[in-house]
Amino acid sequence: MNNIRKFVFTGPESSGKTTLSEWIANHFDFLLVKEYAREYLKDLDRAYTLEDVLTIAEIQSSNESASYMIGRFPIICDTDLTVIDVWLEHKFKYKVGWIFNKIKNNLPETFYFLCYPDINWEKDPLRENPHDRLELFDLYENLLIKIGANYLVLKGSFTEKLEICQKIIQA
């Protein structure tokens, strides 16, 4: 864990990623890279397209790179390109080589918290998958296994998940 420069919260929508990442970043005074998709999509006055998701991927990746330039580690990511990879596969049946390669290239310094969808789904105008969160969870876990990522599945109450995150980060 000494070489970990990035802790990423990933998993299906409404599984606690944003709440957990913000709490952990604040608690440890770590830099937080927010989920860019929310910012991009909130004011979009049309249905998003494949091109929109690819733009989101480029900017999300750029935001992470900018955080690295600051040089204060570790950083906390409220999602990363794993979300884009699964989103593209699930929604568009599409794969992008540079996204997969970027995820793989960052593996030695990344630890993933894979959030299990065991909390109630909360309605949000940007959420669209209330009924297939377990299927999506499997896509995330399969991706992490396929690439050989260091990860831990977070299950339980918010407090239980926080305690697990704190122990891992403090180790």
Image (cartoon, helix red, strand yellow):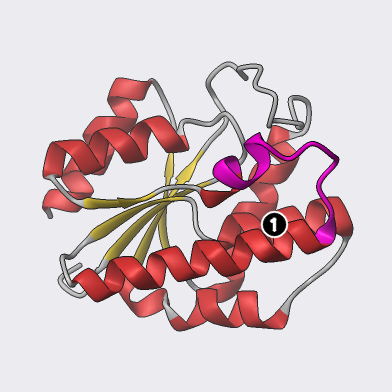
In the image, 76 versus 41, the foreground residue is: 41
Q: What residue did someone put label 1 on?
A: 86
Query: Where does the image place residue 168, in percent across and percent down from the top left?
Result: 22, 50
In the image, residue 106 above or below residue 129: below
Q: Which residues are magenta?
A: 38-50
Is 106 part of what is drawn in magenta?
no
Query: Where does the image place residue 136, in percent across and percent down from the top left?
Result: 70, 44
In the image, residue 54 above or below residue 155: below
Left or right for 54, reference 67: right
Q: Quadrant of residue 71?
A: bottom left
Give the class, few, some or many, for how many residues have Cα within 10 Å of label 1's Cα (few <14, many ≥20). many
Q: Quadrant of residue 75?
A: bottom left
Quarter occupied by the C terminus: bottom left
Left or right for 92, reference 87: right
> Residue at horizontal 53%, vertical 20%?
119
Quarter occupied by the N terminus: bottom left
> Residue at horizontal 69%, vertical 57%?
86
In the image, residue 51 above or below residue 109: above
